[in-house]
Image (spheres, grey):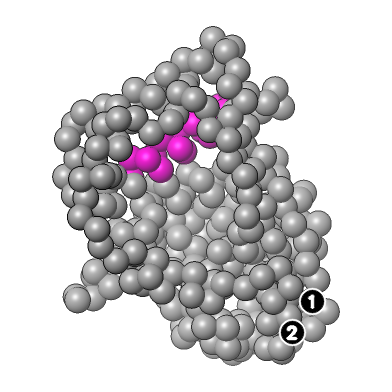
Amino acid sequence: MCRLEMNNIWSEYVQGIMTLYLSRKLRFDDIFFEQYNKVFKLDSNVNLKILEIGCGPGALAEALHRWFPKAEITAIDRDSNFISFAQNNISGVTFMEGDATNLPFADNSFDITISNTVQEHVEPIAFWGEQRRVLKQGGICLCLSARKGLNCQAPCLEMTGEEKEFWESLPQSESEFEKYGIGKYSMSEAELPASMEQNGFSEVTTGYAVIDLTPDAPKYSTQMAEAMIESQRHNDLEAIKSSHHEADEKVIDAVNAKYDERLRLYHEGIKQWDTSISLTMIVRGIK
């Protein structure tokens, strides 16, 4: 496999750029900042050097730049498609290709390291060890990990007949998750902080952010509600693209039609109360 393919595995075969960017942009919206920062315990008035590991297309780094405007933020990812997108669309952050198991930085370089849904894909000794190496003494490691949430779909968003026909027509093949070792190092809510402690971090604490994405909830603006619906649309469309099998236009049209209908219902005030609740575990430790 050529170098380009190796560097684009995630964006080409697992989660597309817009799927990952839009879903994370919602989860790191300013409305949820206080939930995260209760566990982060970072001072926005200090000139921190922050490193995000496994940044994807850059939504968390973008949020960190808003939340900590005095910080110098560097973000790395192995996937060159993600880095290219972030460099072209997000300002105020230095994005570069890099490997979590071999960080391209000198010892004692950063005040903060942070990662979001990365730990479960990386061998623990290397994952924690490299962060301890690049952190300054007293530096903070923040590890965000997705936990089981809940989803309730609007009837109009159920899989269409055209989509079912498309997915059932595909040849059975090895799961991309198994093929690329995705989630190979997943840990329970008890194992994750214990692993951080076992790998040299002290004063380990845990906390949780509950991200409620319910378009019909009155607390959300029209813009936010529309963004929730459009994020799902991009997820469905990019899933079809990631199958690497050509889809008939009728499949794409069917996907777009059902999301257009969901938007129509929203704008006409016909509430569906569909929801996606994600639970993010935040583990914090000190070097």
Residue 275 sits in which quadrant?
top right
In the shown orientation, is residue 18 left or right of residue 112?
A: left
Residue 284 sits in which quadrant?
bottom right
Query: Relative to 153, is 16 above or below?
Result: below
Q: Which mark is residue 204?
A: 1
Report, in whole angstroms, how far the alpha carbon at label 2 lies from the one at label 1.
Answer: 7 Å
Residue 194: x and y, percent?
73, 80
Residue 81 sits in which quadrant?
bottom left
Quadrant in the picture for the N terminus: bottom left
Q: Badge 1 local density, few (<14 within 10 Å), some, or many (20+)?
A: some
Name the residue rendered at 30%, 37% in the picture.
164
Q: Is residue 242 magenta?
A: no
Query: Relative to 18, is 282 above or below?
Result: below
Name the residue rendered at 29%, 66% in the picture.
174
Q: Is residue 231 magenta?
A: yes
- Are the two marked residues, 2 and 1, in contact with CB atoms closer than 8 angstroms? yes
Magenta residues, dominant SS class: helix
Q: Mark 2 vs mark 1: which is more N-terminal?
A: 2
Query: Relative to 113, is 233 above or below?
Result: above
Name the residue rendered at 62%, 73% in the picture.
187
Q: Badge 2 local density, few (<14 within 10 Å), some, or many (20+)?
A: some
Region of the chain picked out in magenta, as a range: 221-238
Q: Is residue 29 visible?
A: no
Q: Which mark is residue 197?
A: 2
* Amino acid type assigned to the residue bearing label 2 in the image: Glu
Residue 123: x and y, percent?
52, 83
Q: Is residue 13 visible?
A: yes
